Image (spheres, grey):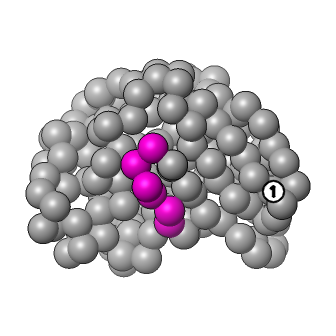
Amino acid sequence: GEKVPSEITQFKIMIPKINLESEVIANVDPASELDYDTKLKYGVAHALGSYLPGGKGPVYLFAHSTDTIFNITRFNAKFFAVKELAVGDEVEILFNNKRYTYIIRERQIIQPDQLDVIRASDSNLVLQTCWPPGTNWQRLILFADIKSVQDI
């Protein structure tokens, strides 16, 4: 990773195709269930040690998915509809007055211990949620590349 700016004034993810808009909570430890369980109640988690938008490596975000619409609020399953995303779809991140637009280039389903797949990727953005929705057997991973950066 790199040095995190001391001030994160804005960190949001928006995925127009699935009407998702959420705060992103920076620097959440994906290896600590205690840490992420608390923080995923408030939004999508940015993995501790991964890069921030505009950095020299991938931004790694994760959140709960769930199997039924009734569980969405209980688990704050921000990534409930991420399963509907396809190659070519756009993901936007608003970060410190810049809009980063990414295009999904690949979908992969991996085992929870196949983290090397993520580490080996040269994509600019990685989205992760559980698969199949409502279980934690596997992980659905979306890899995306940066398309544009605009001041907002």
Q: Position of residue 1 (x, y in %)?
A: 70, 47
Q: Is residue 25 above or below residue 52?
A: below
- Residue 27 shows in the view: no
Q: How far across and down, in percent of the image, does residue 54 sit?
A: 79, 46
Q: Is residue 142 magenta?
A: no
**Residue 59, how many percent across, how many down?**
62, 45
Residue 18 lies within the magenta run: yes
Q: Amino acid at mark 1?
A: Lys
Provide the residue designation for mark 1.
Answer: 98
Q: Left or right of 89: which side holds 132?
A: left
Which of the 4 quarters of the picture holds residue 26? bottom right
Mark 1 crowdedness (10 Å alpha carbons): few <14, some 14-19, many ≥20: some
Q: Secondary structure at mark 1?
A: strand
Q: Is residue 35 rendered to the left or right of residue 137?
A: right
Q: Whole-percent x and y of residue 93?
A: 65, 53
Residue shown at the point (83%, 60%) measured from the top left = 152
Q: Quick check: 51 left or right of 111? A: right
39 in relation to 2, above or below = below
Q: Along the horizontal axis of the image, is 129 left or right of 20?
A: left
Identity of the residue drawn at 26% across and 46% down: 130
Residue stretch rendered in magenta on the structure: 17-22
Q: Is residue 95 visible?
A: yes
Name the foreground residue: 6 vs 14.
Answer: 14
